[in-house]
Amino acid sequence: MVKNRRFEDESSGFGVRHVQIFMLFCALTVAFGMRVNLSVAIVAMAEDPEYKWSETTNSLILSSFLWGYVFPQIPAGPLARRFGGKVTILTGLTICSILTVLTPLCIKMGGWKLLCAVRLLMGLCQGFLFPSCHTVVSAWAPPKERASMGNFTYAGNQFGTIVMLAVSGLLASVGGWPCIFYVPGGVGCIWAVAYYVWGASSPADCKNISPEERELIEVQQGVARTVETEEPAKQKTPWLSFITSPAVLALVTVQSAYAYGFWTLLTQIPTYMRHVLGKDIKSNAVLSSLPYTAMLLLSFVFAWLSKIMQRKDSISLSFNRKFFNCIGTWGPSATLIALGYVTKEYDFLAVVLIIFTVAISSASHVGFLINHIDLSPNYAGILMGICNCVANLVALVAPLLVGAIVTDKQDVHQWRIIFFVAAAVYFIGNSIFIIFGRTNVQAWNDPSSKLSRNSTPELESQKE
């Protein structure tokens, strides 16, 4: 394919594509706000004797979202590809927002059982989110802007978590625990109206984009993307190629390893801190939000460094992705081992290690997290669905393993085993990604055309 120097050298000024990415950032912000609000609300609800449920019931309530979240992952990609990412994102988050607003009423009508059903439905709705976001990002992001746009989109995860943790206590004190549901649900409904008006699945579907910006995106993405955009429903999805591709299997492995390690941190570290180190970080809003705040800020630093490295002719895209993924997985692997040897006298050091462990994992945002788009712009959403489905199933093993090994929550040696297992999973997962991971567009990206083969060196040469 002949390069168009005018578009290759053109400055990436602010355009409609950046508006679309910002709206995806907002989507993930409201989605994670609605996802984490229950963990705070359930504490506030316990002040009312009517809602003072047992720990077993609380665990069942909190896990119900994840059980619904896992199953739509694989069908979400094909649906987003067929009907457009805007349709699946908008439908899922609109329903989720309405359910969030109705949650207090459902609790009063049906207690914890109806709450579990509502959270499971919310999980089903949000299960479409990541594959659909990947589909939209792959359509809107030129290769050179892919890392920065992907990172900004998924920074909404941390931002939504931070905001919800920060304001939930205030909302509960002002209007009672129902406000913890009314506010994020209401904001989600407002976002849905805005996205319906201004959102678009791709440049071809957008009425406001200029011909110049649309041409800039499509020229940089290559001819194979325009073929996919015109007739996505007519192309046969190469499922066999997905499950036999070493690059995809490596991506599934590293995403699963990351999910296992991250969910171990998210769900078990507070328990470890409380019972082993005598520090209850759950009751401290500042300590609870610090790891995610550090993660959010550091993610932009890593995206900036990645963009600088992209400009160096001597640094390949493959090295770029794997370098930052090593930081985001092997870094936490090392700090988890160190955390296992911190004694109660050094609880401040333990808090610092936890914050650092969570924060440095954000380097993977410019590593494996956007590698699906590298491998196949056409099927990025489907690949994300496959990987995220397996990763979340693997993540569910983490609390089960803790329950089997940690029979005494105050036993340091038992917790050390948990940290060592998570560190090993991080290390092995990233090692496989280093060996078998790829960044060039795969031949099966467009099985109906040989054009995708011709676009591979073009995309690779652009040093995204």
Image (cartoon, grey):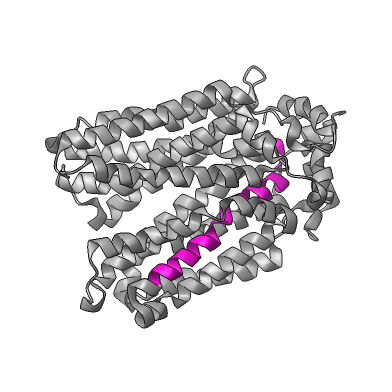
Percent x, y for residue 167?
Answer: 37, 64
Residue shown at the point (32%, 63%) measured from the top left: 40
Q: How many marks?
A: 0
Check residue 410 for magenta coloring.
no
Residue shown at the point (62%, 54%) measured from the top left: 76
Residue shown at the point (38%, 82%) measured from the top left: 109
Percent x, y for residue 55?
Answer: 24, 61
Q: Quick check: 88 left or right of 187?
A: right
Viewport quadrant of the C terminus: top right
Q: Which residues are magenta?
A: 115-143
Quick one: which residue is furthest to the left in this view?
Answer: 345
- Judge whether residue 15 can be spotted in this image: no
Percent x, y for residue 125?
Answer: 55, 63
> Does residue 347 lie above or below 106 as drawn?
above
Tell which of 213 and 387 is nearer to you. 387
Check residue 119 for magenta coloring.
yes
Quick one: which residue is furthest to the top in this view?
Answer: 314
Percent x, y for residue 441?
Answer: 71, 31
Q: Quick check: 374 left or right of 8?
A: left
Quick one: which residue is furthest to the front in this view?
Answer: 240
- Judge whether residue 101 can be spotted in this image: yes
> Does residue 322 lie above or below 22 as drawn?
above
> Does residue 156 lie above or below 424 as drawn?
below
Q: Quick check: 333 left or right of 304?
A: left
Q: Main secondary structure of the magenta part?
A: helix
Tell which of 402 and 435 is nearer to you. 402
Quick one: which residue is furthest to the right in this view?
Answer: 2
Viewport quadrant of the N terminus: top right
Tell which of 405 and 431 is nearer to you. 405
